Amino acid sequence: MRNLLYTAILALVIGAAATAGFYFSQRDPELSRAARAQDAMTWLRLEFHLTPAQETAITKLQSEYAVVCTEHCLAILDARKRAAPELAALEQTCTDSMRKHFTQVAALMSPGEGERYLKEVLPRIDRFAHAASPNVGVTN
Amino acid sequence: MQAWEVAPRRDPGFRAAVRARLAAPGGVSWMEYLRLHAAPVAAACGLALVAGGWIGHKEATARTAADREQLAEGYVRALDARTMPMP
């Protein structure tokens, strides 16, 4: 009985070692670090295989878009405070602007990657709950 | 020597004695036990290896998918003026 127990423990140790081995060897540590740091640019670089030149161009584009986004944000917040009727139109302007920005970003990527990027991000525009706050930085 | 024949006496209790020795506490060492049960032990260890590897692979895949989803969602949200918090 004791030997059977030892053998069961041996099998469990082998199973646990295999679990840990496969888990750590098949995870993407850079992606995990990016998720912990909420670093979206690293995700873009890894996920869509950006070259350094593409990454630089996209970072610049996103910095420019941040200004536009802030203007939209202020206008939307102001309209919400006043319960203004133009709120829906402002939100529509915001989503149109995002679509345009994402299309510009996609154009900077390699063709196949750009298409994949748009498939990933465009459906998310309509899925957001409007009250949620942003939590991921997009600049390096 | 040519005339010499080996004629071992059959012991009818031999198998029972072996079983009793195996079952007795402290009967055989673990190493001996592994040697005597090499096939089932190897099968159990192999099964544990495959099952553990499969679980590890599934967990890693799920973790990567969750990281990716979190980053993609956060990326779009950060560029969405509708989701900005009130100052």
Image (spheres, coloured by chain):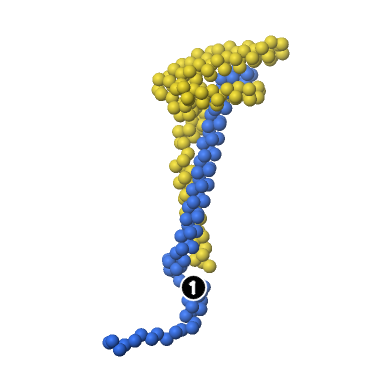
- Image coordinates of residue A123 in percent, x first then y, are 60, 24
Q: Is residue B63 above or below residue B44?
A: above
Res B7 quadrant in image: bottom left
Q: Amino acid at mark 1?
A: Leu
> Which is nearer the eye, B35 or A86?
B35
- Image coordinates of residue B86 in percent, x first then y, are 64, 19
Q: Is A132 on the left-hand or right-hand side of A30?
A: right
Residue at the limit of the structure toward the front, as seen here: B2
Q: Which residue is located at x 48 percent, y 25 percent? A: A113
Q: Colour of chain B?
A: blue
Number of numbered markers: 1
Residue at the limit of the structure toward the left, as seen here: B1
Residue A62 visible in the current orientation = no
Q: Is A24 on the left-hand or right-hand side of B84?
A: left
Q: Is residue A47 above or below residue A108?
A: below
- Image coordinates of residue B49 in percent, x first then y, are 48, 52
Q: Colour of chain A?
A: yellow
Q: Which residue is mark 1?
A: B22
Label 1 Cα crowd, 10 Å radius (few <14 / some 14-19 / many 20+): some
Q: Which residue is located at x 50 percent, y 55 percent? A: B47
For mark 1, give the secondary structure.
Answer: helix
Residue B72 visible in the current orientation = yes
